[in-house]
Image (cartoon, rainbow, N blue to C red):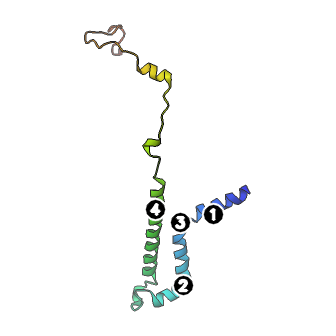
Amino acid sequence: MKKAILYLLLFLLLFQNSGRLVVLAWFKLYQPQIVRTLCENRNRPELHCDGQCVLAKKLAEADRQQQAANWDRLTEVSIFMAPQHLQFAFDPAITALTTTQLPPYRADCRPVSGPAIFHPPCA
């Protein structure tokens, strides 16, 4: 059962962006007919377009469809819990630390250790 799920997920992962592959396979399969009927330059064979114009249009269309599908998935994924449902539990030890009174600030207070400890290194 695990192997079946593994192969299924591997198949889905490898072929999730197979739109371009399908378009390329369709183009190679029907290239002679595309050159005769759909190519914009079928009346000017000296350009040697060989249906590349149709392929470019189909690939661009497949990319647009893929981007639209990705955007839809992205907007669906970005939804999260509303703030009114969030609940926080505060630890009593942390709230006790935040409610302790600190001594008032004094501008004339100097550090206990003097300049004998803190000085630039000797060369």
Q: Which residue is mark 2?
A: 30
Q: Is residue 115 above or below residue 6?
A: above
- First along the sequence among labels 4 and 1: 1
How far apart are labels 1 and 2 at the CA level? 26 Å
Q: Which residue is mark 1?
A: 11
How far apart are labels 3 and 4 at the CA level? 15 Å
Specify the amino acid type for callout 4: Asp
Q: Are marks 3 and 1 in contact (CB under 8 Å)?
A: no
Q: Is residue 2 above or below residue 88?
A: below
Q: Nearer the viewer, residue 42 or 48?
A: 42
Q: Which mark is residue 17?
A: 3
Specify the amino acid type for callout 1: Phe
How far apart are labels 3 and 1 at the CA level? 11 Å
Q: Are marks 2 and 3 in contact (CB under 8 Å)?
A: no
Q: Is residue 33 above or below residue 121?
A: below
Q: Are marks 1 and 2 in contact (CB under 8 Å)?
A: no
